[in-house]
Image (tube, rainbow, N blue to C red):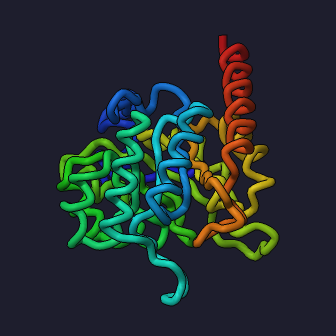
Amino acid sequence: MLEIDAKRLPLVSAYDNDGKRKPFTRFDVGTVTIGNDIVVIAGPCSVESEEQIMTAAKQVKAAGANILRGGAFKPRTSPYDFQGLGEVGLSYLKQAGMAVGMPIITEVVDTRDVAFVAEHADILQIGARNMQNFTLLTEVGKSGKPVLLKRGMGATIEEWLHCAEYIVKEGNHKVILCERGIRTFETYTRNTLDLSAVPVAKELTHLPVFVDPSHALGRKELIKPMSLAAVCAGCDGLMIEVHPEPEKALSDGAQQLTGGEFGTVMKAIKECRNLMTSMEE
């Protein structure tokens, strides 16, 4: 098991200076409690239109998701790819969340946008490409809003935890770690989903740990088995991409489930969680 220097990570370390285990972090986002049971974040990769995000919101709500996701500001590999609708998209996302009674999460990519996005979103997401954007981490820490911190595609677990420390040291203890796959020599999947990061992070820290199989795999047919594997690994939540018409998506269509497919995955997740609970009793 990886060992970390608790003196360099005093706030996110699982242990205090006396070697005593700290309680696991739990906090509320609206009516949803993070760190208590499996929480599922779902919605499209990008907010593309008012109709699209509203339809997706209704679909994921009906299937049992807890939090609505949607990208308004989209950092893309190519500058010519769809970059999101910006403030308009954020407005659509907020309206959809309110309509179905779900908290919302969206990515913030610029320090200049933190205050504005924090006014609308319930959780701020720091994407893999910005994991080590220390100025941005400091700003979201100051915002006081819950933060979901994705692991960088080339980052070690220790580097990931140091980035969480940047947020928490600003007084914001509502941090979620999110494993979303790392870059390896394998090309069949978009990234390699490092499920070992879940029990390792939960051993080293007191923070909740989520898994994003959609970005890790890039292939929607693999989302169900790897979501179940993540549950068995002990994750506190999942982030799954769902689109009303994935074949027409403006970004990452290959990794997005339809509403019906998501319903099937949610049923399997519930059954898996029930089985895990019965085994623990």
**x%, y% of residue 4?**
45, 52
State whether residue 69 is above or below residue 262.
below
The structure residue drawn at horizontal position 57% and vertical position 43%, both measured from the top left corner, is 238
Q: Where does residue 68 sit, x and y in percent of width and height?
A: 47, 45
Residue lying farthest to the top in this orientation:
281
Relative vertical location of residue 251 with respect to residue 163 in this rendering, above or below: below
Which residue is at 66% across, 45% downward? Answer: 259
Q: Identify which residue, 113 or 238, lies in the foreground.
A: 113
Q: Is 259 placed above or below 49 here?
A: above
Whether residue 206 is visible, yes or no, is no
Q: Seen in the image, is 274 located left or right of residue 37?
A: right
Classify residue 40 by image quadrant.
top right
Residue situated in front as seen by the camera: 42 or 249? 249
- Residue drawn where x is 21% and y is 72% of the image: 112
Residue 132 drawn above or below residue 163: below
Where residue 132 appears, x then y in whole percent?
39, 70
Quadrant housing the C terminus? top right
- Whether residue 51 is visible, yes or no, is yes
Name the spot of residue 114 as percent of width and height, x first: 24, 63
Q: What residue occupies the far front of the structure in this picture?
A: 51
Residue 260 falls in image quadrant: top right
Q: How many marks?
A: 0
Judge left or right: residue 112 versus residue 34: left
Q: Residue at x 37, y 30 (%)?
A: 26
* Left-right relation of 241 to 192: left
